[in-house]
Amino acid sequence: MLKNRQSFEVSSRAARPALVTDTGGGQVLLKFLQVLPNKLRLWKIFQVHVNTSAEYARSAAMDLSIALAALAIILFSVFYRSRKKQMQIFKQLGIPGPEPNFLFGNLLAFKNKPMFRKYQDWRQEFGETYGYFEGPTPVLVSSDVHLIQDVFIKQFNNFHARKLWPVQVDPDSDEDVHMFFARGRRWKRLRNVVNPAFSASKIRQMAPTVNDSINQLLEVIKDSSKSAADRSIEVLNLFRRLTLDSILRCEVGVERSSVKDPDDPFLRHCKGVINDTTKMPWLYLLGFLFPTLHSVWITVYKCLHYIKFNPVFWLEDRMREVVVMRRQAKKENKRCDLMQQMLDAQFKADSFKDIEKEHTRGDSSHGNTLRSMTNEEIVSHALLFLLAGYETTSTTLTYIFFELSQNPHVQQQLRREIMTVLPRGHCEIAFDDLKKLTYLDYVIWEALRKYPLASSVTARQCVQSCTIQGLTIPEGLLIHANLWDVQYDPKHWGDNPHEFDPLRFLPEMRKTRHPAAWMPFGAGPRSCAGLRFALLQLKMVVAKVLRDFDFHLSERLSLPLNLEEGATIMPADGVHLSALRRPSAMTEIGSLRRMSSVLAIAEMAGVNVGSRRASLATTEDDVDRDSAASDEEMDMEASWRSYLAKRRSSRRSSILDDELTQESICDIRRASITKGIEMLQVSSIHKGLNLMRRASCGTVLEKCGDIGQSNPDRAPTATQSSSLLDNNFIKSNLELLPSPPELSTEPTSFLRSKQSKRRASALPELESVRELKTLTEFSPRPELLDDVQHGFNQLMDKNILPLTFLCDVSPGSRLYKRRVSG
Ligand code: HEM
């Protein structure tokens, strides 16, 4: 080093003579150069120091990392040992199960298979009851119906908590936790608020709204099926639009038209929420692996959503707006829905914290002051119902229609029942009529048996150590009911559980079955809160849609269905079905026929119906193109049309007397039976009725019934209508027509073939086609009931008609007339 310094000094000096000759600036530079060697020396010393400290630092870092590594190894081994110890729990309880990985538990098993399928595999391997681990968390899975019944029903007090998901609010500390995740007393209070909103009487009030949404759906099915080559439609998305629409309207009072608008923002955001749960698997995985860091994952989840757009927040904002609006609404504008129920609810506690304190102290005297639900609580509940109702019901509808398409004989039988209980002419489906559709119940129950789509939530957490079926269950253990195995178990469902057979639900079959063998809505006090509403929708949709459309599997559908597990278990690629419009579709073609008959009456009565006739012809053509009917139905349709055409062409020359053949009587009769009069103006009714005076007194009575239930805008006034029924009027008709006309010719054969079809379906009490013809249902307006009843009495008193009528003018303003026997 010294040597180096000398050589450096030499070389510096050697440079100096050249600069001595320089001016003043050169002097300064010279001075600087004289001190430079010293400076450089300092720099070198500094460098040596730095090098030495770097070495120290390096070695210190090395030591530190060794220490850290040692610590990590120690921590890891502690962690490993404690995990391993935790994972001994099933072995200690003597419960079999797959061998867990110390970090993931058995989570990796779900990498390539949905959970419900893996459960089925494990059931084969380990039997009815086994245990596995989600990270460190033990989960007991069982398809033993006795154990399930104990957990869900008999020992509910020890199992009132749900299974917690890693990224969800903490039910014990979150003030706005909703009913689904709440537990203990808080859950009970919330459930008590919600239950009345789903009572039978509330559901009855919702029926017209659901009806209305379904009418829109029928239009959409018609249009969508037309646009595809094989008339196929993707039904899962379609039903989602419907269920969202009706839940928004019925539960929170928001009028949307998502049925018609596939881009409706509510629909988009609801889909976004459902997808969102599966879009962050890494966060869920971390949550599963390290459940003790729950609050960290929640914070990350929330922060992420502030960075990234979150559809949940969008929906919450909309719900907030609704809550504020509804709070400000005047008393007279109050609706009668779930939202109102929550707005009016009163809790016997000051705040959430008080409830919890009360709970921990076991003190029920505290919190006697009433408090209402906060806006945030209502918002979180509104969102819960929106999401719980929208996804589950639409997926169930998809499975029902898929199975009906796969099993045409079931579809046919179901349609027969529907057409019997709700024949043509029934536009709206009354709530009470739904109860008569028992086979429809069986079909829905069977679809839910084959596809228990909400099986991922049928789990409970043990809140107090207890013994069930000889097993000691420690506090905190999760118990999951393995619905897919229970509902396919040959022990309960016979040798062919994969077959779609609604008759499994015949009362005598149900009696012998264990109640926990079928629980797609869960069981016990925490079972599905929206069950009644879901069934209302399911029944109404199937009844109305099946009446108008035939469903077949589309060529675009690949089988078997690829089921994936998200919020529910749903077909991953949707379900494509071909929807063929039935020629008897009541909504349009049925009314066309009625219209046609009525126009015929009006024309005969000399009313100018030219423009209506023209528009009817165009629509009929449209329907012709639309309808893909069976051969038999085509024949019937053809005979009907040719009859009408014949009538139309001969009508111009002869009106009234000449036309009063048996055929026209029959036509008029049918027109009235199908309540066609509602399509006419008052004046036409009168003219039509004049004609009918000559035709049939039975028809006149039917007409009276029709007038009563016709559209209020077009119906004659009460006075006009009752004048039709005065004694003189009836007498003159009775004189004219001593007996009902004999029915013959084409329309009769058309009618007969249709009726025999109906008879075969489900009217065993009917003896013949003629009897069926007289089975008519009227819905007169309440103010006309007395008149109509009076008319019937007159006829029966005088014993003019060789028929016996059962008349029943019920308070529900319905009048039934049934011929008992000839
Ligand atoms: C076919 C349709 C539906 C199915 C299959 C279904 C299924 C289920 C299941 C399996 C549970 C868990 C029950 C348990 O843990 O024992 C549940 C709970 C629940 N469902 Fe449904 N659900 C349907 C429709 C609806 C509808 C339409 C609504 C609301 C409008 C709704 C609201 C709820 C609520 C609030 C709970 C939580 C009940 C509680 O924790 O007390 N569900 N549902």
Image (tube, grey):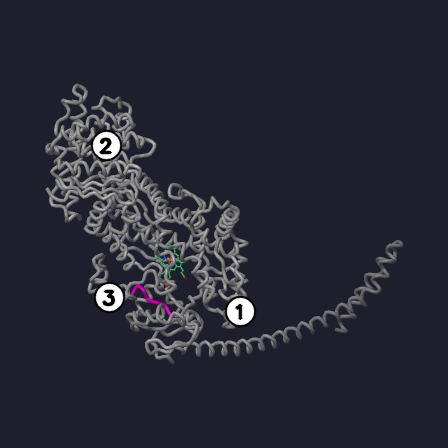
Residue ID at (61%, 75%):
64
Ligand 1: image quarter: bottom left
What is the secondary structure assignment of the residue under circle 1? helix
What is the secondary structure assignment of the residue under circle 3? loop
First in sequence: mark 2 or mark 1? 1
- Image spot of residue 206 (x, y percent): 37, 48
Residue type indicated by callout 1: Lys
Task: Determine which of the numbered discs, if any, sits on residue 357 in the image.
Answer: 1
Q: Quadrant of the C terminus?
A: top left
Residue type indicated by callout 3: Arg
Cα separation, mark 2 vs mark 1, equals 72 Å
Q: Which residue is mark 2?
A: 725
Mark 2 surroundings: few (<14), some (14-19) or many (≥20) residues within 10 A = many
Residue ID at (58%, 74%):
65
| Front label number (2 vs 1) | 2
Residue type indicated by callout 2: Leu
Where 704 sits versus 756, above or below?
above
Which contiguous range is marked in magenta? 479-485
| Front label number (1 vs 3) | 1
- Image spot of residue 604 (x, y percent): 20, 24
